Image (cartoon, rainbow, N blue to C red):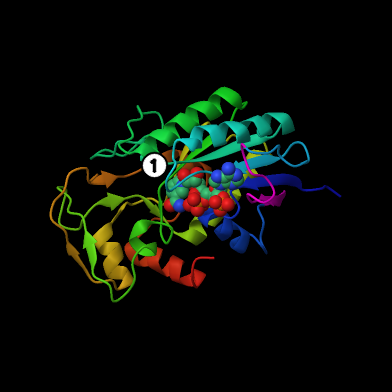
Amino acid sequence: MTVDARLVVTGANGRIGRLLRKLWAHKPPKGLFPIWLTRTEWNIGVEAPPDLPTGGVLLDLAGVTRGDFERNPFLASKVADLSQQLGCKLIYVSSASVYPGGAMDMDEDQALAPVSAYGRSKVAAEVTVRAVASNPTILRLGNIAGADALLAGNRQGKLVALDQSTYGNRGPVRSYIGPHVLADVLSLICSKAIAAKGIGHTLNVAQPDPVAMADLLDAAGYDWSFRAPREGVIDQVALSLGRLQALMPVPPATAPSLVEDLCRLGGWP
Ligand SMILES: NC(=O)c1ccc[n+]([C@@H]2O[C@H](COP(=O)([O-])OP(=O)(O)OC[C@H]3O[C@@H](n4cnc5c(N)ncnc54)[C@H](OP(=O)(O)O)[C@@H]3O)[C@@H](O)[C@H]2O)c1
């Protein structure tokens, strides 16, 4: 009988961590046994990591998404150190915010040019991870329906003030992924990593076909109106998804399908 390899997941109490714990509870990634690390099990950068089995995969979801972003490279370096100690494959979860955005699809090999402090901290974390870990894979995640400011930060009955875009009359456009699709994609990526199937050094993660924010708000039944034009709005961040789709089929996103995926969760875990 073969024993499943370990999949250590840091940041297990965050939005993505809680989602994976719920959706993988009955269907963990094939060939892997998850070990969930919250801050209680390991306060990263403050205490030594707990004893863990060697080998397997380490999925790093720990990070600062609000506030003190400067800590991101430091936290990433500590998790990368752990991956070296355990001799396991590190998958670091970065973000589409490392890209500048614009009319073209954002390709994994293009020059990075983050426009926000958060994006700059994720670039610095990526550089750190590559310097410390052997052969890590970096995932650059697009917007997650329900974990983003648009759907999570608003509700029916509240008038949403939407930024205008110079590209069209439906507001900013982003590559999105629904929560169930995200859980399935991360599951397959982790399983392929342990099966020693090449998953590449950098992978954009989202569903094909970027979605306009006004379409998402309409699909969710939220009232909205455009706010006055303001500086610093990124009209479009569309991810190039050829690499991901070469690894696995990922269904295209539409605004209604993203909202349906989120509603099926019955509330974010
Ligand atoms: N959510 C998105 O839409 C999105 C999109 C693209 C990329 N990402 C990236 O995906 C990763 C996970 O995102 P998320 O939305 O789940 O973030 P989140 O909700 O902010 O969760 C981050 C987790 O990291 C943990 N953490 C922070 N500092 C720690 C420390 N010193 N020791 C131990 N744990 C620590 C936090 O623990 P506590 O709960 O104890 O504070 C939290 O549970 C992040 O790196 C983020 O940049 C997220």
Can residue 60 be seen in this snapshot?
A: no
Segment colored magenta: 30-45
Count of numbered circles in the view = 1
Q: x%, y% of residue 222? A: 28, 71
Q: x%, y% of residue 89? A: 65, 35
- Verify whether residue 32 appears in magenta: yes
How many C-alpha atoms fall within 10 Å of the one at disc 1: few (<14), some, or many (≥20)?
A: many
- Residue at the outermost bottom position: 157
Out of 52 and 75, give the one closest to the viewer: 75
- Residue at the outermost front position: 46
- Residue at the outermost top position: 131
The residue located at (65%, 52%) in the rendering is: 29
**Looking at the magenta stretch, what is its main secondary structure?**
loop
Q: x%, y% of residue 200? A: 53, 33
The residue located at (38%, 50%) in the rendering is: 208
Can residue 130 be seen in this snapshot?
A: yes
| Image quarter hosting the C terminus | bottom right
- Verify whether residue 59 appears in magenta: no
Q: Which residue is mark 1?
A: 96
The secondary element bearing badge 1 is classed as: helix
Q: x%, y% of residue 171? A: 21, 55
Going by the numbered disc 1, the residue's amino acid type is Ala
Placement of 82 over or under 11, stated as above or below: above
Q: Is mark 1 within 8 Å of ligand 1?
A: yes
Out of 86 and 207, give the one closest to the viewer: 86
- Quarter of the image where one finds residue 240: top left
- Quarter of the image where one finds residue 158: bottom left
Question: Left of 267 or right of it: where is 169?
Answer: left
The residue located at (45%, 35%) in the rendering is: 70
